[in-house]
Amino acid sequence: MNRLNRRNFLKAALAASGGVLVSTPLQAMSRPELPSDVSFRHGVASGDPLQDAVILWTRATPVRDSDRLSPADRVRVTWELARDRDFTQVLRRGSVETNIARDYTIKIDVQGLEPATRYFYRFVGANEQSPVGQTRTLPVGSVEQLRLAVFSCSNYPAGYFNAYALAAQGGDWDAVLHLGDYIYEYPADGYATERAAEIGRALPADNGGETLALADYRKRYALYRTDEDLQALHAAAPFIAVWDDHEVANDTWKEGAENHSAEEGDFFARRAAAIQAYYEWLPIRPPMGDTRPQIYRSFQFGDLLDLHMLDTRVIGRDKQIDFAAYLGEDGSFDGRAFGAALADPERTLLGPTQRNWLAETLEKSTGHWQLLGQQVLMGKMLLPAEVLMSYYSRGKKPDPTRELVQLKAASLQGQPLTDAQRARLAQVVPYNLDAWDGYAVEREALFRHIARLKKNLVVVAGDTHNAWSNHLTDDSGRLVGLEFATPSVTSPGMEAYLKLDEQSAVELARGMPVLIDDLQYCNLHQRGFMSLTFNREQVQAEWRFVDNIDSTEFSEAGSHRVVHRLV
């Protein structure tokens, strides 16, 4: 960021564009007013691209002491959009004001742009200009190939955002999909903070409480957005984002959250504060306005792909079923009552309004591929009940996983099993009731609808912190789509929950696809991101991993690729 003489900087900036001062194609402007003295310490971002529009974002932090500014005090900056990084071909320029009521964030919805076009943008203050960002609009008509980067679960105190850096360095992305948990709400001594001080990622004292009020959420976003690697990826490509639970509180559902108690105040007031801060700090175009929690929306990448971003957290989800509620004091499991709860036809993850919207949207969509961007695993992750019961017994029962993998492998190879052994393998339960497995009736209805439409369906998911590749099959065993789930940027995965060393995690990852019929691949111990490449004939998912998150010094630690070709 460059500190320049105010007069000379503005003179040079105006001369570079030949005096073309237009903010939208329909509104010509006079020369912008002089900008205020601000800094751009949180970088720039773009998002929600359309064929003819894109959102540009920054935060104009007043250089003056912000504690002395009132809601009536405004700051002004100039924004510019150009065809080249050096801004010799400036296409648009305008002025925009912001104030403390918007936390000094700025969003410009630049319209009237050309499709499938790369643009560069920046913001200008009195003595400083922002970093230069790169964005692009969506294509129209025939499209041969698309490349998307997919992320989830970036917990600041858990480690460094090296996965963002890897993607920023290594790809020309059509868009970045962020599937949620962009921030975490916990206090300084909360989830995944054990090594934060040691590695230099501890939450500062003025940002160390749990996020409950609007000011808390704003400060947490401000901290995350000081991360250089997150800034670099935002500046490299447009984001298309949805929230998961931690943007509000852990295991959010439509009327509460696991990590919210009555002592913490009204849940809906907390949710409203969280949503306001999210809309302020993300380069998103809220489909129903800045105060509404409806975030689901669609994007068309020419005739190749239609992307539908869903909300499986905030507006429609019924409360999660809890395994513990069906365990007896002796460790026995009430399978009958559990099965009845799971089979309740009224249970919903999407809610009726969003579910109907999705059904109608899929029916009308004409893209060669249909992509659902959402938070939680959709595949049937059914494990033998013994495995789950050993986990919930907290070490009181031996772990039968290895033995069961051997039995399942023997069965697949045609070796005879005893009735008791077959029964052990047949009694399966979903391992994660916070995912679609906890809402199985609604999932089956969605699968039937997709099968009837005969669409080429791909689903992406985050949330679990691990990498997964699933076949999506309905109850008849018919393949209706594919699922690819991205690992976390920093949050610990199954290896941490099960207290596995690396070797044990690798062994379990080899065994899980044997035990789970629809699971094709998983990685249970590495952090990173996922890329998707679509063309007419195939979709390729590639998981790319980093060797550590304890330092900004890192290298790529391998990758795994899955290719699915259309018949």
Image (cartoon, rainbow, N blue to C red):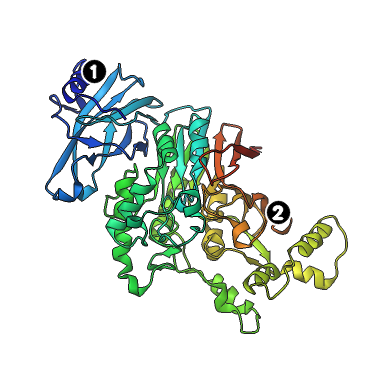
Q: Between marks 1 and 2, how big is the CA–CA gap?
A: 58 Å
User: Visible in this render: residue 369?
Assistant: yes
Residue 331 as seen in the image, left or right of residue 161: right
For disc 2, the marked residue is 513
Residue 553, percent across and down? 54, 38
User: Visible in this render: residue 180?
Assistant: no
Residue 44 as seen in the image, left or right of residue 401: left
Residue 402, percent across and down? 76, 62
Residue 393 as seen in the image, left or right of residue 135: right
Q: Single out the residue that lies furthest toward the right.
A: 416
For disc 1, the marked residue is 17
Please, what secondary structure does the residue beneath circle 1 have? loop
Residue 368, percent across and down? 52, 36
Binning the other alpha carbons within 10 Å of mark 1 as few (below 14), some (14 to 19) or many (20 upward) gives: some
Q: Single out the residue that lies furthest toward the bottom.
A: 329
Camera-side residue: 202 or 151?
202
Quadrant in the rendering for residue 29: top left
Camera-side residue: 438 or 477?
438
Residue 500 as seen in the image, left or right of residue 226: right
Which residue: 67% across, 63% down? 383
What amino acid does circle 1 point to?
Answer: Ser
The quarter of the picture where the C terminus appears is top right
What amino acid does circle 2 point to?
Answer: Pro
Binning the other alpha carbons within 10 Å of mark 2 as few (below 14), some (14 to 19) or many (20 upward) gives: some
Please, what secondary structure does the residue beneath circle 2 have? helix
The quarter of the picture where the N terminus appears is top left
Which tag is nearer the camera, tag 1 or tag 2? 1
Q: Single out the residue that lies furthest toward the front.
A: 198
Residue 64, percent across and down? 18, 42
Which residue: 28% across, 31% down? 111
Which residue: 51% across, 59% down? 194
- N-terminal of the two: label 1 or label 2? 1
